[in-house]
Image (cartoon, rainbow, N blue to C red):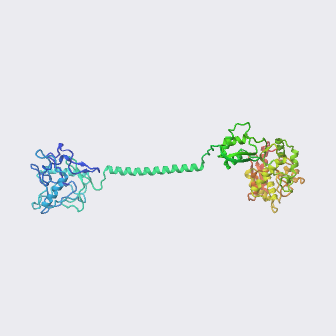
Amino acid sequence: MTERYPLSSAGAASEQSGPPFRRLSTGRRRLEPTAPYDAAPDEAAPYGAAPDGAAGRDLDVSGQGLTPAPPSAGVSLAPVPAAPTAAMPAAAASPRRRARQAREQETATGPLQTLERHPGPVAVSSEPEGPPDPAAGPSFDGPHDAGHHEHRNHEHRNHAVRLGHAGRSQPAGDGPAPGHVLDEGYDDGHGREHVFLPGHRSAPSVRRQRRRRRNIVMLVVLGIFVLGVVGMATFIKQIIPAPAVDYPGPGTGEVTFTVEGGWGPIQIGRRLAEQDIVASEDLFLEALGQVEAESREIHPGEYQLKHQMRAIDAATVLVGGDNAKVHYVAIKQNVRTGAVFTEISAATGIPAAELEKLNTQPELFGLDDSIPTLEGYLHPGEYRFPLETDAQGILQLMVDATLKELTGQGVTDPQEQYRILKIASILQAEALPADYATVAGALENRLSPDNTETNGLLQVDSTVIYGLDRYSLQMTAEEKADAGNPYNTYVHKGLPPTPIGSPANTAIEAAISPQENDYYYWVTVDSTTGETKFARTYAEHLVNQEQFRRWCAANTDVCK
């Protein structure tokens, strides 16, 4: 690269001259001189001519990876302007002025020789390439001494080593490869040329690219996090429904709400929510506990309410309404008719004898005349009867509840209904709810007339005990062999004459849909936990019975 700003004899720029380069907006440093070197238009020396009293510097490219093209005839190479002295202005011509002067000079003398970047590193050498040919035109060499020339070559070699050009050599005198131009550089003000290597990116550019990649990664991570939070919130919202908001009240329209006998607070709250009288069942139950009343019982009957009432308003009407007081009766699961009549009589004051008389007249309640008693039809549950309800009306409510369950399960034939009630009552006496379906399948296997294990005999203790009008499962061998007991299923094949209690809905469902299996026997081997073992043969059943006897021997307080 041509040295545009010659040094003084001391080899350094004048301190008053200022920095010889200008930094561009891209971070690169501009090669052209800064303002202090620009000469006034009328004082600038002609392009290519050395000022008076100063000599141009020769171009040394040995340390820059450059090789000047050999001069040819007719080519005029202009010397580089010398450094400013006391006798001349301190500033050189501006870049625009020098360009114009270069065009004028080229027109007058021919094109200037162009220096191009050599494609590879060049040899670092301090030896001159030889005397120039006088016929070829002006020489690059100026009136410098050899020592100063060696000093410049040494500086170029050091700078080439710093830039990574040392280590490989190029034979001196080889011409530059076409198409390679010298990259733009700058003078650091101390006589050293700095060349920007091809492909070199400035530090600000690298930092911007890294910052851009980092920002992209952060945006991707942030997007994934936001999507995860939104997805989790949506999932939680789906599995955890938002609590219902109570209606502001006072409600609209008029609706007649009927509380049936046997309904509890939960069922009442569910029906209120279904009819859009209250916002939700939970709000009604919460409000029911806040009602100030001597008793928070809700009696059967009809109540005049509104749609979309406040829960506390609906609860207040149902609890403290003007409805007549009622009788309350709670019937346990699988209790016999005698126990049911006792409970009804105690709650209503109706004589138990009157209820017993109605028990033998099932046709009064819409049942088939082949059914001997109401056993099995008196559905368990909680009942509230108005005070004026008579004995038949009370029993009718219980029978209707049982028929409603059977027809709801698809059993409409009266005889099949009665058969289901018998099996369901045995299930409740023989097994726990978890084993209802399995035991129901075993009962159906025993009832099969062609089975060779029991030959059509149910052989269950609960039926024998019912016939003996006892509740304890302990019985003697004589009682088990007594054929005079019509409920003795060890002697009489098939189902007992009547159900042996009032089955609940779960037992009715299992009797309607028994599990298909090949079991014939079962025995509870631990009465405290209800563990039940099943067997396919009588030999297996004997082993299970022995286990039960050992348990009873260790728990005499339970097995009485």
Q: Nearer the viewer, residue 550 or 3?
A: 3
Residue 12 is drawn in which quadrant? top left
Give the quadrant of the C terminus. Answer: top right
Q: Nearer the viewer, residue 480 or 374?
A: 374
Q: Nearer the viewer, residue 386 or 140?
A: 386
Kindly give the residue lying farthest to the right in the view shown: 484
Residue 307: x and y in percent read 67, 47
In the rendered picture of this protein, how many numbered marks are placed on residues? 0
Horizontal arrangement in the rendering, residue 96 relative to residue 319 (left or right) = left
Q: Nearer the viewer, residue 415 or 559?
A: 415
Q: Is residue 33 visible?
A: yes
Residue 525: x and y in percent read 76, 49
Horizontal arrangement in the rendering, residue 247 relative to residue 178 (left or right) = right
Residue 30: x and y in percent read 24, 51
Horizontal arrangement in the rendering, residue 42 relative to residue 307 (left or right) = left
Q: Residue at x 64, y 43 (%)?
A: 249
Q: Is residue 488 visible?
A: no
Give the quadrant of the N terminus. Answer: bottom left
Q: Residue at x 13, y 58 (%)?
A: 130
Residue 189: x and y in percent read 20, 47
